[in-house]
Image (cartoon, helix red, strand yellow):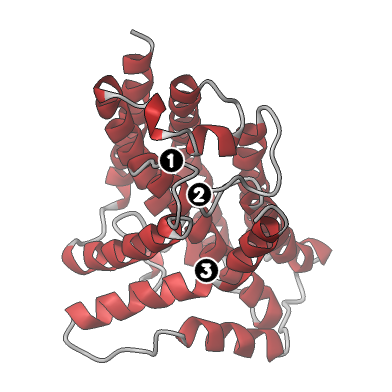
């Protein structure tokens, strides 16, 4: 399993993300009482986008063409530090969770640069909203990481996500629940899901992520969409490892975290079918709740 583990991790990181988006869409279709697109439709869409020709505005520069691929590479690189199964990720070092957080920030930085590079005030508005909300998601993410570090005593992402259940006791139940809740709110925000954002929206005044990528087409849009699906898998794995910790050496259960991420995708579809989108002025309150939840978990661990 030692040699197979990195290969399995890499193949999962590359091949599974579109399936999660298909699961969300299929769940939403089922709740709406319609058949909806096929489960594998995101794969077909990505193939179609990467085969299309790119249409570029005359105002854009090389930054616009480079940004989607920086986003894709940085997201994939971050995924190599987060365990997707019950064995360690291919890459790890002490304090690697800081690199993971800022690899996501690097992708966001280039995405907003590309939006500003178009010269469109509308895409600039979307970039402004994206950066404003990230101001609150990053503290919640770091507080969640610090809580897990305190619980496990490890500074490696694989270490604090794969700590055996023997390290956990009844006193850690509340901190883990609060941290998992806060990370779930961060997950919804970072993956542009309801109630913060709607990837299927066409309402101009409420668009956030979609507003930044209106000028992207062909392979550039494909890279952005693929990156979003990959981030869904990575952050989803982070949430399920926190919400449902289990022994790293559990026989036959190596695929359980991936199954839990699929269940999480179904839950996201149910959530998006049952709840409306928040007003923009209430999104900061929603993210403040994520910060307070992870912060409360950290404070409980410092007692």
Marks 2 & 1, CB-CB < 8 Å contact: yes
- C-alpha span from label 3 to label 1: 25 Å
**Numbered circle sitting on residue 247:** 1
Question: Residue 239, image x and y in percent?
Answer: 40, 46
From what the image shows, is residue 259 above or below residue 54? Answer: above
Residue nearest the observer in this picture, 260 or 195: 260
- C-alpha span from label 3 to label 2: 18 Å
Residue drawn 78% across and 64% down? 66
Marks 3 & 2, CB-CB < 8 Å contact: no
- C-alpha span from label 2 to label 1: 8 Å
Residue drawn 36% across and 16% down? 301
| Badge 2 or badge 1: first in the primary sequence | 2
Packing grade of label 1 (10 A; few <14, some 14-19, many >=20) is some
- The N terminus lies in quadrant: bottom right
Does residue 192 show up? no
**Numbered circle sitting on residue 17:** 3
Rendered image quadrant of residue 225: bottom right
């Amino acid at each position: 399993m030692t040699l197979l583990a990195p290969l399995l991790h890499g193949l999962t990181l590359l091949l599974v993300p579109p399936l999660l988006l298909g699961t969300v869409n299929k769940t939403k279709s089922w709740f709406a009482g319609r058949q909806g697109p096929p489960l594998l439709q995101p794969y077909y869409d990505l193939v179609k986008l990467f085969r299309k020709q790119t249409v570029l505005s005359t105002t854009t520069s090389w930054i616009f063409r480079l940004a989607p691929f920086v986003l894709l590479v940085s997201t994939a690189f971050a995924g190599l530090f987060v365990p997707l199964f019950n064995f360690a990720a291919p890459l790890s070092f002490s304090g690697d969770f800081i690199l993971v957080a800022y690899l996501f920030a690097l992708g966001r930085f280039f995405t907003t640069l590309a939006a500003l590079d178009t010269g469109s005030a509308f895409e600039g508005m979307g970039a402004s909203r994206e950066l404003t909300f990230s101001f609150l998601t990053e503290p919640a993410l770091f507080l969640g990481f610090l809580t897990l570090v305190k619980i496990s005593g490890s500074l490696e992402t694989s270490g604090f996500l794969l700590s055996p259940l023997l390290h956990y006791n009844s006193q850690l139940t509340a901190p883990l629940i609060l941290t998992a809740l806060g990370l779930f709110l961060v997950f919804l925000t970072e993956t542009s899901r309801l109630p913060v954002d709607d990837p299927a929206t066409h309402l101009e005044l409420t668009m956030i992520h979609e507003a930044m990528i209106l000028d992207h087409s062909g392979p550039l849009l494909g890279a952005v969409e693929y990156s979003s699906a990959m981030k869904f898998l990575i952050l989803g794995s982070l949430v399920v490892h926190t919400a449902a910790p289990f022994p790293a050496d559990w026989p036959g259960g190596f695929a359980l975290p991936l199954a839990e991420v699929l269940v999480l995708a179904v839950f996201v579809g149910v959530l998006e079918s049952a709840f409306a989108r928040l007003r923009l002025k209430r999104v900061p309150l929603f993210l403040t709740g994520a910060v307070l939840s992870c912060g409360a978990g950290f404070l409980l661990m410092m007692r």
